[in-house]
Amino acid sequence: MRQDIPVAPVLKGGETVGWAFLTSDFVGTTGYSGKPIHVVAAVDKDAVLTGVQLVEHSEPIVLIGIPDAKVQRLTQSYAGLDLKAEAAAGGSAHELDIISGATVTIMVIDDSIVRGGLKVARALGLGGLAPLTASGPQRQVNSELRTTEDWLTLAGDGSIRALTLDVGQINNAFAKSGDAKAARRREKGPETDTYIDMKAALVSVPSIGLSLLGEAEYANLENWLEEGEHAILVAGHGRYSFKGSGYVRGGIFDRIQLIQGDRSVRFFDKQHRRLGTVAAGGAPSFTELDIFKIPADSGFDPAAPWRLQLLAQRATGPVEKSFLTFDLGYRLPEKYLQPLATAADTAAEEAAAKAALWQRIWLDRKIEVGVLAAMLTVLTAVFFFQFQWTRNERFLFWFRMGFLTMTLVFLGWYANAQLSVVNLMALAGALKEGFTWDAFLLDPMIFILWFSVAAALVFWGRGAYCGWLCPFGALQELTNKVARALKVPQWELPWGLHERLWPVKYMIFFGLFGISLASIPLAESFAEVEPFKTAIILKFARAWPFVVFAIGLLIIGLFVERFYCRYLCPLGAALAIPARIRMFDWLKRYHECGHPCRTCSNDCPVQAIHPTGEINPNECVNCLHCQVLYQSGTKCPVVMRKLKSRKAFEARNKESFKAPPVAAAKPAMKKEKVNV
């Protein structure tokens, strides 16, 4: 193993014949999952890849809809790739093979293998490749030059570059590709018809931007771009669109990418703006006019040559497609450049790259983040207005079952957003070794959940997460509800035994925490006492001892609701410790609770209410069942007595307000005349 470069020697007969490396050690390319795709590759002394193997990925598209073996075969096909040719061609000497339905994922794998291989070959000097170094005077864009030119002048001096393909050229290209199906499905019409006429210009250069965009639009562009960012204008017309429609579904423009050396930049919808018209005089009309932002962390150098690669596709079946790539080369004319005054700050570049990485991951997972934010908003509303939410027992039951199902299926099995005591051990290790936010921001779902848990501990204690947002807790409760529906007998532990089992989870937590102070990897091994990885992250696709352990806990949970949560969960113990700091007591109680009424303590699903009536915040999961009973006119003796008294009072008032009976009128007496 080399000490300076993370590569390992490949030996044959005791002699080093090549070097093995992990692509994620050299490039931070991420896919739809927002996580790196890990590929192990080996390169020989002639800078030729001798073996490639996909070892780990988290791509939902591949995991759900496409056989893993298909992706493995494609990855292994990179064996034999000549990195010398890739270096000469800027990473495009090979033909890009695409699996339909996973275009972006395969492009990410391709980018990881080629860029990672080139970095290793240059670092080791394989095949005569030397590290990239600046030769001659370094240059930068002259921001003081702000002259404007017409379209013809800009096209003539190279400020605007073009890629033009007609129908005949695209048909011939697919005919030579070796794909018989694609060759047969020829583009119809005259061969001289325009297939695509694509123009590109670096409009972040002031003179070019002012000429093509005009003063007002260029001012908007300057406001849009942050420090170190650049922008290109891409215009086109013809039968083929360089944008396509894939970006509407996935947020990524998969038909174009910018390539400079061994770096590539793909554009997202947030990095895109439409342009109405070209301001330069004499400009032709276009059906597509779009501006794309080049991120600061991409390492783009406006003074160096680059190319815009177009991915042309042709349908060969109901879902199958064939792909070809065409390059539009670009070099900024010398008149826009001047000598660079200062060297780049590498520390600032590294910080910017880390920030851009987690920001890109958050952008990739924006839908999941949005759904989680909606769930947290709804749950917060439930807790703040719990008195109104718990008036109807049936409504609360089905709402809770629906929310727990969403927690299990979406947060757990889909988004893998299961918190773990391992997260806390990693935090402790980071605080000991030097804390930075970057590592914790790489997983937006986990970060948001921990942030919400921290806030919930102040208001409601541990129950907000354990009772509503924990996927394994949801799995336990849902399976127990199914068991109850099937008349599976429920076991209620005697209070004395139940109370003495509480400390077990605290012992487990403190044991794991103590081990983590000595060795975090060892603590992570012992943290398998949590069945979360088996049941939620890996969905039971694991070695049989782990599966038996997880299923065993779920089986016990059929008879004792949330058995694991009550007695064994170290994460629950860790959250219960600061639960005492909560500022409010939201769960309402009567003076009669426990004195002598025990309805709530007998009905509490996790026995978190003492026989004397107090709710233990360390054990309560905020299911709100006690709040339903608090308002129940058929179960709570206090409410029943109040209702009875009210009825009696209303009855008495009704009786007292009745009008007295009207007496019958007496007949008038007849007066007699008396003579005196």
Image (cartoon, helix red, strand yellow):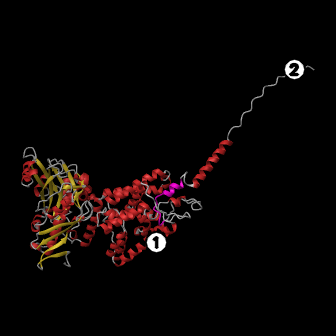
- Residue 323 position, x and y percent, is 14, 54
Residue nearest the observer in this picture, 527 or 36: 527
Residue nearest the observer in this picture, 367 or 264: 367
Residue 252: assigned label? none
Above or below for 646 versus 358: above
**Neighbour tally class for label 2: few under 14, some 14-19, many 20 plus, Cα within 10 Å:** few
What segment is highlighted magenta in the picture? 617-631
Above or below for 430 versus 214: below
From the viewer's perspective, tell me whether residue 578 is left or right of residue 358.
right
Q: Kindly identify which residue carries mark 2.
A: 673
Q: Is residue 137 visible?
A: no
Q: Kindly identify which residue carries mark 1.
A: 503
Dominant SS of magenta comes to loop
Report helix, strand or loop for mark 2. loop
Q: Residue at x 49, y 50 (%)?
A: 392
Report helix, strand or loop for mark 1. helix
**Neighbour tally class for label 1: few under 14, some 14-19, many 20 plus, Cα within 10 Å:** some
- Residue 495 position, x and y percent, is 51, 66
Which residue is at the far bottom? 14
Residue nearest the observer in this picture, 385 or 49: 49
Name which quarter of the figure residue 468 lies in. bottom left
Type of amino acid under label 2: Lys
Q: Quadrant of the N terminus?
A: bottom left
Numbered disc in front, either 1 or 2: 1
